[in-house]
Amino acid sequence: MQQILPNSTRTKASQTVSQSTVSSSTGNHLSHHTSKIQVVKRDGSKAALNIAKIREVVEWACVGKDVNPIALEAGLTTRLRNGITTREIQDNLINCALEMCSPEEPDWRYVAGRLHIWSLWKDTLANRGYQYGNYDQTVKTKIDHNQYDRRILVYSSEELQEAGTWINSDWDTDYDYAGAVLLTSRYLLPDELPQEALLTCALLLASVETPENRLKWARKFYEAIAKRQISLATPILANLRVPNGSLTSCFISAIDDNLESIFSEVTNTAKISKNGGGVGINVSRIRATGSWVMNKPNASGGVIPWIKILNDTAIAVNQGGRRAGAVTISLDIWHLDVPEFLEMQTENGDQRRKAYDIFPQLVMADEFMRRVIHKQEWTLVDPYEIRTKFGVELAELWGEEFEQVYSKIETAIHNGEITLYKRVNARELFKHIMRSQLETGMPYLAFKDTINRANPNKHEGYIPGVNLCVAGETKILTDRGQIPIADLVGEKVNIWNGSEWSEVLIKKTGENQPLLKVHFSNGEYLECTYYHHFWVQDSYRSQPRLVQAKDLNPEDKLIKYRLPLIESDNDIDFPYAYTSGFFSGDGTYDGLGKPEIDLYGVKKDLLPLLTIRNKYYGGGSSDRGTQWRIEREEIGIYSDIKQDRLICKLPLDIPAKFTVPLNGYTIKSRLEWLAGLLDADGTVSRHGSNESLQIASVNRQFLLDIRLMLQTLGVDSKVTSMNEMGYQLLPDGKGGYKEYLCQSKYRLLISSIGLFQLGQLGLKTHRLQWTLREPQREASQFIKVVEVELTCRRDDTYCFNEPLRHLGMFNGILTGQCTESFSNVKPGLESHCCNLVSLNLANLDNSDLEDTCKIAVRLLDNTIDLTHPPFEAAKNHNNLYRTIGVGCMGLADWLAKRRLSYEHLTDISHLFEEIGYWCTLSSMELSQERGAYACFPGSDWSQGKLIGSKPVEWFIENAHHPERWAKLAEDIQLYGIRNSHITAIAPNTSSSLVQGCTASVLPVYSRFFYDKWAKGAVPIAPPFIKESFWFYPENKTYDQNKVVKAIAVMQQWIDTGISMELLFNLNQGVYFPEDPERFLKAKDIYDTLILAWREGCKAVYYIRTVQKDNFKDSDNSCSSCAN
């Protein structure tokens, strides 16, 4: 086992502090205090105080730091007493070190951090019997206690042992006290050491890599994390190791104006908060106070009651006990409830309409900001009234489209057509916002048009109104069989409309159109446009109603249909029909790729029915005859004596294993093929006198093809899930049982009426025994909608105009035809989610950025495949967009180390250009390896635009290295990009303490201060305080206009958002040295906020104030990375 305080470390310590100095000074100083002192050890036993052991620990903790260990030992003397515990001695040493920490001697905080880690090491040794050095045993123990995710077992014991050799315990000693305490208290599991936690994270992050590359990437991930070059976001560091953890930091969703949507989002919020994520929820669609409910005016209570429910949810579900939930509620600036929204966290007023624990955000339109500047009127309206009278969802509009609709609304108000509204002065409303910000720090401001202009996925933000239908591979039921619709373009064909044949002309109706994927209870699915028509029937007696695909709901019932019997125009039989069906059910290919069948048990009696390659017999034992059997071509039937089976070689020209006689073959041969399949792998299910058939297979598409073939025989059936992929206990071939990983399995069900119809047509099986019995009644069930999936697929579309019933069979489903329409995606279908890490700029040089960015992007892309999204809409978003957020922390350290300030905008721009370039390049390279994100076709990325949807010409004009950006744009168009969004900068206030750097990209609040923690005052200082003290500007006295301009420069290279916090000092003369009597005025804050909007910042996070040298307490909120 690896020993704490190895000899090499003690030698290193003695080189720093000479033994003679210690013995002559410290030893004499302590001697008269220690002669009679007894200490109580961790196990409860007593022993004489060992001065040498204390000195050894002190020397080790001080190695390499600019401190005097004698001072620490001297400070301990006054705290020693008889009966003191070893833990108290350790705590006293830590407290002494913390008390001696100062701007002149900041290294004492590292000494305290090492002493804290020493205690952790000792406790872990006492609890589990070893420290570092037995990593594979740690993994096994944690799995046995259900503390580690079993996915780490993709690594063998030998691989885990190798990974354990990478651990460097010295990296534990790099934390200062604040970082060490946060790491051990917030992120470590019981009896787990820091490097074990980080290594386990790295191994799991690499577990989705190919087996030959896993260890390579795991080591890269581990070293970047352990050296604190990359900081994992809290959900990843806290949840990745544990089973079923969510790794996503932030979610953004919207609530629709109905109870189902509201309470669905409450549930989702609870699930997100439970796993430590932050959530942003837009409530702008909810009707305003005084609006109509069930046609009754003045009945709605507005958005506040629903926000209060979300507020209470955030309190109740407290992120696994770590902290209260972080819920940001956003409301568009045109909403009638905005004034009350701004008063939601004040002390006065009705407490039932207060919500003190959420984080309010206002979504600002450019038109509003322009009216603020020009002191013009602004109109607040009710979204419900606008929706019902104008047919638009105002919350989903931005830019020119919003401005055009908003102008029409104001005209309608002038004409008396709108009843629920309020006119306010835009400047006065903005002042109200500022007053709230100065009192509470909130609301956050999100500049909606700036955000949407930079969105590369605008093509998914709206749906064009064109004539649309289904994807080209969709099979339609014709009198020639089930034929892909794209193969029939321009032809007149007879299609089945659910009741009779009808002649139609097949047309191509659109190009590159967005498609939905509708899943049905019979196992089928249909990829169609948002507006494809379905006839839905609530019950047998109710009238059918027309529903567009986008508006389908789970459990919607489709109208029923009849099926035709399709006879072939020719007399072509399916080759080797019975044998081919049997081969599809129970056949395989030998080592040379030639078809064969195993017959065992009663199936051996079926040999005369099969077509064999030749009739020569051979025999032997399966232990020795396999290769001989394969190579002896003249042997057509091989008798395996040991296994008691016949191995039959089939004709070489037999159709491939899963070929179904779908079209163009005689009814007789289709039935013979089906009989062979049933005899090979079918079963008869009996319920009283009713009999039905089942066929099981791991090949779901094969069963769906059989279903379509059965429809050509006039028989309906369905495909259901039999069991999901997982481990099952199966015979191991040696007389015992063993767990095997089994694929998902499905089954085709043919009802008793279907079996009767097939029997009447002439179906005859030989192994399966059933009775031709007509059921008393037809009891077919409705086909139901299971799910409407957003696939983000775009493709050419096809349709026809069926004149008799306006219906047709698409993939065996009876549906209507399409019309033109216009709509947006509804809330609840997809919820933005983002997985985050941050580059620690304090520990990175420019030469490190390429490799570190590539590691960060790959690591985050892997988390998408590892995470367990808490609800379906979040899963949809991950699948469609693969959004990640590589952020930064420690910019203040990076600047101070280079003697730069926040006014060096060119240097800041060059740094973030490097980060933006390498992260974007890395995502493009991942796309080459793994494929582009699903919605890449049609995105701004695919059009040659780059970060922030800016054209490549912008980069050629503004980049420090323009030529590489032009090449990158070409490569993205050619190879795609893996992630729709790649960079985002979060506040990371707590995680930056663990990383030992300044938070995010903002200046430090103060160069050195003591933070009040539960255990006492903790010194906080930036890492380069000794070398670059005066190059750390303090944010509490720094001109915030300079901060805004620096953030605006960074934003040009960051494709999502930056959590910009502004700090205003209200004391006299802080910003105006030439006028020491002047206070900061409201107009100054107003100018800064307007500057943020004009400079292209996407959001303003907190507004904090310093007044009379007091600072508002910080909190643990979460900023939306998509702002």
Image (tube, rainbow, N blue to C red):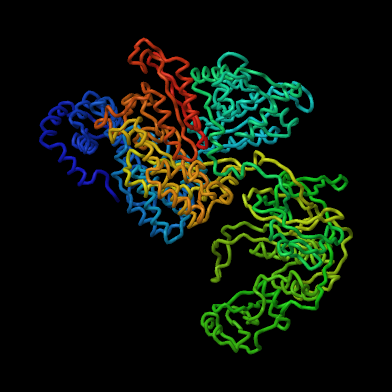
Name above or below for residue 457 compared with residue 689. Answer: above
Extreme residue toward the top, this view = 1077
926 with respect to 110 (left or right):
right
In which quadrant of the rendered view does residue 545 lie?
top right
- The residue sitting at 20% across, 35% down in the picture is 55
Name above or below for residue 333 compared with residue 907. Answer: above
Name above or below for residue 357 compared with residue 689. Answer: above
- Front residue of 557/501: it is 501
- The residue sitting at 23% across, 37% down in the picture is 57
505 with respect to 868 (left or right):
right
- Front residue of 476/452: it is 452
- The residue sitting at 75% across, 70% down in the picture is 663
Image location of residue 458, percent across then percent down:
59, 42
- Front residue of 245/42: it is 245
Image location of residue 86, percent across then percent down:
28, 33
Image location of residue 888, percent across then percent down:
40, 38
